[in-house]
Image (cartoon, rainbow, N blue to C red):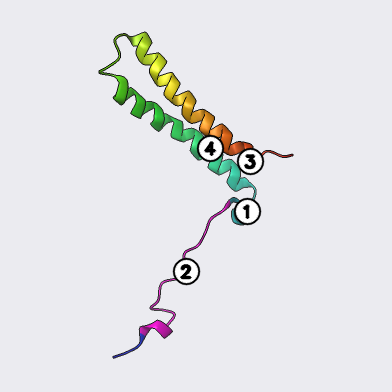
């Protein structure tokens, strides 16, 4: 039987990490953009969650807005760590 552990073509490559420093400064902008676009998903999920339970359209708007703002604050808090000193 052949030992495949010594053959580099048959063993998986080590997992790569993709932190902002290894991807360059523009990676932060890309990460921020993806996070902001994720707010659309938060809004959609929130609409589905509250649609049947909200008594009025105004209450639905209030609940969905609160969910999106909460998610936005989390993004803002995470991005604060990248702000220049």
For the residues bearing labels 2 and 1, Cβ distance under 8 angstroms: no
Question: In what quadrant of the picture does the N terminus appear?
Answer: bottom left
How far is disc 4 from disc 1 in space, using C-alphas?
17 Å
Q: Which residue is mark 2?
A: 14
Residue range highlighted in magenta = 4-19
Point out the tag, 2 or 3, that comes first from the N-terminus.
2
Point out the tag, 3 or 1, that comes first from the N-terminus.
1
How far is disc 4 from disc 3 in space, using C-alphas?
16 Å
Point out the tag, 4 or 1, that comes first from the N-terminus.
1
Please name which of the two marks, 3 or 1, marks the residue nearer to the observer. Answer: 3
How far is disc 3 from disc 1 in space, using C-alphas?
13 Å
Q: Where 19 falls versus 55 (above or below)?
A: below
Q: Secondary structure at mark 3?
A: loop
Q: Where 47 falls versus 24 (above or below)?
A: above
For the residues bearing labels 4 and 3, Cβ distance under 8 angstroms: no
Q: Secondary structure at mark 1?
A: helix
Question: In what quadrant of the picture does the C terminus appear?
Answer: top right
Q: Which residue is mark 4?
A: 33
Please name which of the two marks, 2 or 3, marks the residue nearer to the observer. Answer: 3
């Amino acid at each position: 039987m052949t030992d495949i552990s010594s053959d580099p073509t048959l063993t998986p490559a080590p997992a790569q990490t993709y932190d902002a420093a290894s991807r360059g400064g523009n990676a932060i902008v890309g990460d921020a953009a993806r996070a902001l676009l994720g707010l659309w998903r938060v809004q959609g999920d929130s609409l589905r969650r509250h649609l049947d339970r909200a008594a009025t359209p105004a209450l639905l708007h209030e609940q969905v807005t609160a969910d999106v703002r909460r998610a936005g604050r989390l993004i803002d808090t995470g991005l604060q760590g990248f702000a220049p000193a």
